[in-house]
Image: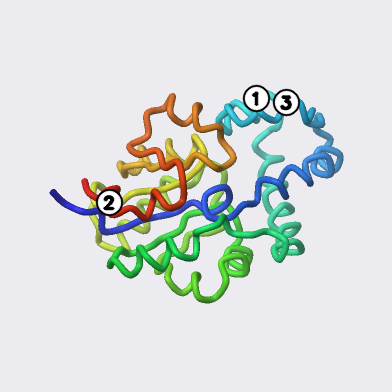
Amino acid sequence: MMRYRLAIFDFDGTLADSFPWALSVLDHLADRYHLRRVDPADIDRMRRFGARKLLKEYRVPIWKVLRMAGYVRKLMTQNAHHIPLFAGIDALLQGLAGQGLTLGLVTSNAYENVCQILGPQNAALIQYYECSVSLFGKPGRLKKILRRSKVAPQEAIYIGDEIRDLEAARKARIPFGAVAWGYTHPEALLAHAPDRLFATVDEIGSTENWLI
């Protein structure tokens, strides 16, 4: 029985509790980019959608997504000090690094925001960063980390909270671990049969979950 050698994390909704902040800027983004506002009563239903379905539901063209992404990163830079990590993330990253796992991160967020929210001690534990990734650009970045780290796909795992994270892992032929506390409802993630479903942060750090 082997152990994973490389753990790659998504950031928002996986390590950082940024969903409340994201909800707080939805109306502003809708008005700025001339989109339909999200009804608060519709949030739970939205959490069951993948990114493509959300874009279709709210009629957001890809070209507009590209403009919005940069603006959202700038907004978050101004508010990063208000966005916490989920409880237990400090101990999780330190524990995994202490077990000898190599850590990576693939995210649509900006490197500066990630480092500010992680804090210097946690940021130093992560050896491979791929940040400011386009909405559907994660497969290529995962493959890039595999090449740089010289780790075989089956010995790595990508841990995230969205259906597009799961899809990216499959395109990169990496096992996927879904988290139950992020942007996407866990039932929606389970419907896509992830390799792991982590119910709590502590569960990720459990040694038996790193056996293949």
Spatial separation of the CA atoms under disc 1 and disc 2: 32 Å
**Residue 145: x %, y % from top left:** 36, 58
Q: Give the residue pinned by disc 2.
A: 210
Image vertical order of residue 35 relative to residue 17, above or below: above
Q: Amino acid at mark 2?
A: Trp
In the foreground, 79 or 209: 209
Residue sitting at x 70%, y 30%: 43
Q: Amino acid at mark 1?
A: Arg
Q: Extreme right residue here?
A: 31
Side of 154 relative to 114 (left or right): left
N-term mark: 1 or 2:
1
Q: Nearer the viewer, mark 1 or mark 2?
A: 2
N-term mark: 2 or 3:
3
Within the image, what quadrant is residue 128 found in? bottom left
The number of discs equals: 3
Spatial separation of the CA atoms under disc 2 and disc 3: 36 Å
In the foreground, 51 or 38: 38
**Residue 50: x %, y % from top left:** 55, 30
Residue sitting at x 58%, y 59%: 85
**Residue 164: x %, y % from top left:** 49, 37
Q: Residues within 10 Å of mark 2 (few under 14, many from 20)?
A: some
Side of 147 relative to 130 (left or right): left
- Give the structural element (helix, strand or loop) at label 3: helix
Side of 152 relative to 134 (left or right): left
Q: Give the residue pinned by disc 3.
A: 42
- Give the structural element (helix, strand or loop) at label 1: helix
Q: Give the residue pinned by disc 1.
A: 45
- Tag 3–tag 1 contact (CB < 8 Å): yes
Q: Amino acid at mark 3?
A: Asp
Spatial separation of the CA atoms under disc 3 and disc 1: 5 Å
